[in-house]
Amino acid sequence: MSRLAQTHGLTDIQQEILSTVRDFVDKEIIPVATELEHRDEYPTQIVEGLKELGLFGLMIPEEYGGLGESLLTYALCVEEIARGWMSVSGIINTHFIVAYMLKQHGTQEQKDTFLPRMALGEVRGAFSMSEPALGSDVSAITSKGVRDGDEYVLNGQKMWLTNGGTSNLVAVLCRSDEGHPEGTARHKSMTTFLVEKEPGFGEVRPGLTIPGKIDKMGYKGVDTTELIMDGLRIPANRVLGGTTGRGFYQMMDGVEVGRVNVAARGCGVAQRAFELGVSYAQQRHTFGKPIAQHQGIQFKLAEMATKVEAAHAMMVNAARKKDSGERNDLEAGMAKYLASEYCKEVVEDAFRIHGGYGFSKEYEIERLYREAPMLLIGEGTAEIQKMIIGRRLLEEYRFQG
């Protein structure tokens, strides 16, 4: 086990879960990740293995067939999985956010219907806020849900759905003006709809089309898609929580824990980059000795390890605060911001240590170099995190003069 990024105070059960996941990553993910990534191939066997481990139900309560574990346990598992291949952690993350939103905000019927099958991985989740013309400005969404008897009719186009093709349950945020008079704040006229669909591409149910995978620089293997709704009819009992106008709050609650997840992913990718860098530096020789014995490289390794350690500590703190029932948007924003920035820097230093070989697809660091930038954008850009952090700090430190 690595000296870095240790988490103190874990229970025996948490340690056992993490040890099992780490073993799975080392044996089943790392040996095949780069080959699958270069082919942009969905990791079917890996996903089946995660189902068998029960990871799709890690935070789903035991009464619904899950393991009932904490956000901290989940984040530490994500850290391990991202260390193996970040795309796999994305497959779990979107599923987890939908399950979390159902657990926190769903009606009893919605929980009973979906959570047991989500715990088994039979129902796999995706969630959708962004649209082609907007990402960070969630309140500006234009997709609409209009009441028609016992159903809602949904129209609009969504963008950047992780698991858009492979999922069969999508939480979609739309504008719904029902019961919200003119002049109502935009974020108070949004509703989350639970959309069931067939996995795949094309018209996956009447009125719903998943055009195909978006070709990306990195973060391959996992499918990222658009979602087009054209007269999509959804039963009224598939409004999350049963009440319209709560969608923005529900989604932000999900994204808050998602930011802890992105921080964990940054920690995992940074750990792997450090492992690759420190290993290569002891094998590569220049001027008659391993480059690890050159002070310039030792300085890089020292900085990399310090960043790995600091990011992990902030991620753990944010997860523990959420688990305690306290508000953690400040800590989650800080952790996501720092971990993603440090991840990019640690990966680049490992890339530099590899020299020319870092540019070769034969070496794992080439894949990490393309994956790290996604963390600067996902679940809110670095700039959005700094806005959130700044506003919260001004709330906490309001001038009293």
Image (tube, rainbow, N blue to C red):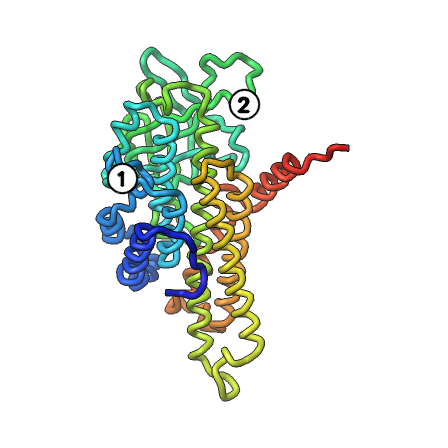
Front-lying residue, 56 or 59:
59
Secondary structure of the residue carrying tag 1 is loop
**From this viewpoint, is residue 172 visible?**
yes
Mark 1 vs mark 2: which is more N-terminal? Answer: 1
- Name the outermost residue toward the bottom: 288
Amino acid type, callout 1: Gly
The disc at residue 57 is: none
Quarter of the image holding residue 207? top left
Residue 87 location in percent, x, y?
Answer: 37, 51
Q: Nearer the viewer, residue 9 or 202?
A: 9
Residue 305 x %, y %: 50, 65
Viewport quadrant of the N terminus: bottom left
- Identify which residue, 392 or 225, lies in the foreground: 392
Q: Residue at x 51, y 62 (%)?
A: 346
Residue found 53% across the figure and 28% down from its top = 139
Q: State the quadrant of the C terminus.
A: top right
- Image: 252 above or below 12: above
Residue type (three-letter) at the residue carrying disc 2: Arg
Q: From the viewer's perspective, is the residue at label 1 or at label 2 nearer?
A: 1
Task: Indicate whether 31 appears above or below 229.
Answer: below
Considering every residue shown, the one lying at the far right of the view is: 401
Callout 1 environment at 10 Å: few (<14), some (14 to 19), or many (20+)?
many
Label 1 sits on residue: 66
Residue 91: percent from the left, percent from the top? 34, 46
Cα gap from disc 1 to disc 2, whole angstroms: 36 Å
Residue 36 visible, this orientation: no
Judge the density around disc 2: few (<14), some (14-19), many (≥20) Cα neighbours within 10 Å: some
- Residue at position x 51%, y 55% in the image: 311
Residue behind mark 2: 186
The image shows residue 11 at horizontal and vertical percentages of 35, 51
